[in-house]
Amino acid sequence: MKKTKDSYNWTYATVGGTTRVSITSGEDIAHLGELDRKQWTVLSCPVHGLEMDESTLAMMDSNGDGKLHVDEVIAAAQWLTSVLKDKDMLLRQEDTLPLDAFNTECEEGQRLAASARQILENLGKPEATSISVADTSDSVAIFAKTQFNGDGVITSASTDDEALKAVVENIMATIGKVTDRSGVDGVNAEQIEQFYTALADYSQWQADGQARKADVFPFGDDTAAALAACTAIKEKMDDYFMRCKLTAFAADKAESLDVTASQLEAVSNMNLAVLNDDIAQCPLARVTAKAVLPYDGINPAWKGAFDTLRSLVLDKEYPSAEELTEAQWQAVLARFDAYNAWAAEHKGDAVAALGVETVDALLKADQKAALLELVEKDNELADEAQAIDSVNKFMHLYRDFYKLLKNYVSMTDFYESYKDDIKAVFQAGRLYIDQRSTDLCIRVSDLGKHGEMASLSGMYIIYCECVSKLKPAPITIAAVLTDGDVDNLRVGTNAVFYDRDGLDWDATITKIVENPISIRQAFWLPYRKLANWISERINKSAAEKESASTANMLEKADNVKVPTNAAGGAPAPEAKKSAFDIAKFAGIFAAIGMAVGYIASALVSLAHGITAKWYNIFLILLAIILLISGPSMFIAWRKLRRRNLAPVLNANGWAINSKIRVNTRFGKTLTKLVKFPKAVGKDPFEKPAWVKWFWRIFFLLLLAFGILFFTNRLAPYGLPFHKEKPVAEVVEAPAEDAAPVADVPASPAEEVPVAEE
């Protein structure tokens, strides 16, 4: 970072292979606003789902968007350092603060110090010299003995006037209630206004009805009950009169509209006392073309409802009548038209349960102004209450702010997570699986988003769904494995996850993102893939042959016919099978012979090359190993160098501004493999040691024999694939004093061919 003469002198360190700013003093925290945004490791992080007090992060989230941005962190840093005498106290991460630590030279510091003493006094600790997070967090205890606390809510304890207390209780019973800071139910100004508005509306509505009492209440105070009695039987009454009309219209079908003999016979042998619903399905009375309802012939299931109707309505409208016509019934219903119109205009239903007399009494007493005055007195203490809330916020940030910075600005907590007492805020706990444990477990909020970005990290990630009987809902974690083998890991494998509170969860792998874990694993990967491929091909071929063989056997068994002789005796002898056709397989034998010849030729050539120098065999083996495992190891090396946690955190809602490298050495501290001490005793089922050594020596001798055989034993036999370079014949020149030899022509049989150069 380029400095000017007025810029702050930052200290930098290499953390996780990347240069980052070091926050090691209170002055560093005070100057966070001067740090270049490009040098921050994180630009925003989620408020929820981290291993940190969510209330602390929520207090810093000034805009309430669920994310903590750089500007909000800077604002918190400036506020904290301005109200503390010693800024370095923030590095202690303590939950208790001496009262004299506030900077009373500034107005905000004075206000916080005074509010802290008020809190301790409310808690019954006037002599205390320090305050803690536990003290400021218990708002119920802080305001338990106060009449007013600045939240605009009054309770029965807010006044000594019994009449006002009664009104408060009525408001809570009808309009609703809110919880006061003291933890007691109360009401606010809005609810008081709603209550008195409802009282006035209900009283006016009732007065309008009384003004037209003769029309609105045809049956006096029993009008509502009379209407309910009519409504209860109206459908059955209308059904009866319609049946009578149909009987008059179709007399030949009258029996089907009335109670039939078959219906009565069907229930005659049953307990009729428990068949009330079935009986109620029958007509209200016996159906006749006269269309008159007789009072003494009512269906027993409807007798009670009809008697109520008769006592409240019919006996008053038609005192001496013993039967009812449809016209009379319609006239009765018309009597309620005015009442129904008035009821449709109802108002103030919320206070209707109090009754009109109580409503009028409350309106007459008119305690509204007195109640609102109490609310106003409570609001006058809003600044004091706000200051008490500020002390609570300050104490939470005093304890947690430096921890946040070590996970936000520099990420040092993550790179020191190999220590048992230090973990990053995104590390949710520890997963035990396949004889190892991993501390790099991150809660996943959106599995779909993780699936898209996780592969960019270059890490081997297993996603597990975790459930616990002590928690209402399951959680999903992304566990990163940075050491060990992965042969036994697959979807469906079970494990155990321990969260940061020590609670155990049953974990099951639901998804795997595969990437290299180590160079050693990459070395063996091609051989394992080959072994798996061969195993799969063998298993597949065996399964296909078994299936075909079984199908063929079943087909033959189904089609078999047992021949018999003419007398029905023993079966005829089996026909002779066709002879083996050697010509049919001649081509196959020839191809196999050629293949064997080429393979033998290649082995001999290889053996000659090996035996030229004794150490060539090791060089060749090394070359073969590098040829097979080299590409896999190179790819793994490149990916391990680029392994980056940032995409995993980005998928979880973070805005990571820098790479978060996890190299091989650091990865071994995050994933710990099992280590057993030396075993005591002998396994009774283990093979004897001499058996293992016997087979090892046997295969070494077999290999040596094979090399010697192809190099020294096959050559003298002049195999067609073994060609030996001919040596030119050397003819000595005759001596100078020797007599010349006469030229004698050689016979054709004696000619010796000369090898071509």
Image: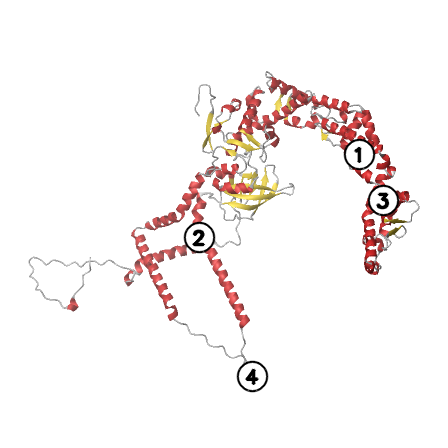
In the drawing, does residue 434 fall left or right of residue 139?
A: left
Marks 4 and 3, how far apart in space?
104 Å
Tags 3 and 1 in contact by the CB under 8 Å rule? no
Q: Which amino acid does label 4 sit on?
A: Ala
Percent x, y of residue 463: 54, 43
Classed neighbour count for the residue bearing mark 4: other residues with Cα under 10 Å, few (<14), some (14–19), many (≥20): few
Tags 3 and 2 in contact by the CB under 8 Å rule? no
Secondary structure category for the residue under label 1 = helix
Classed neighbour count for the residue bearing mark 3: other residues with Cα under 10 Å, few (<14), some (14–19), many (≥20): few
Marks 4 and 2, how far apart in space?
63 Å
Coloring applied to the structure: secondary structure
Disc nearer the start of the sequence (1/2):
1
Most extreme residue toward the right is: 320
Q: Quadrant of residue 653?
A: top right
State the residue position of label 2. Answer: 530
State the residue position of label 4. Answer: 567
Disc nearer the start of the sequence (3/1):
3
Q: What residue type is labelled 3?
A: Ala
State the residue position of label 3. Answer: 331
Q: Which amino acid does label 2 sit on?
A: Leu
Percent x, y of residue 315: 90, 44
Residue 151 seen in the figure: yes
Classed neighbour count for the residue bearing mark 1: other residues with Cα under 10 Å, few (<14), some (14–19), many (≥20): some
State the residue position of label 1. Answer: 352
Secondary structure category for the residue under label 2 = helix
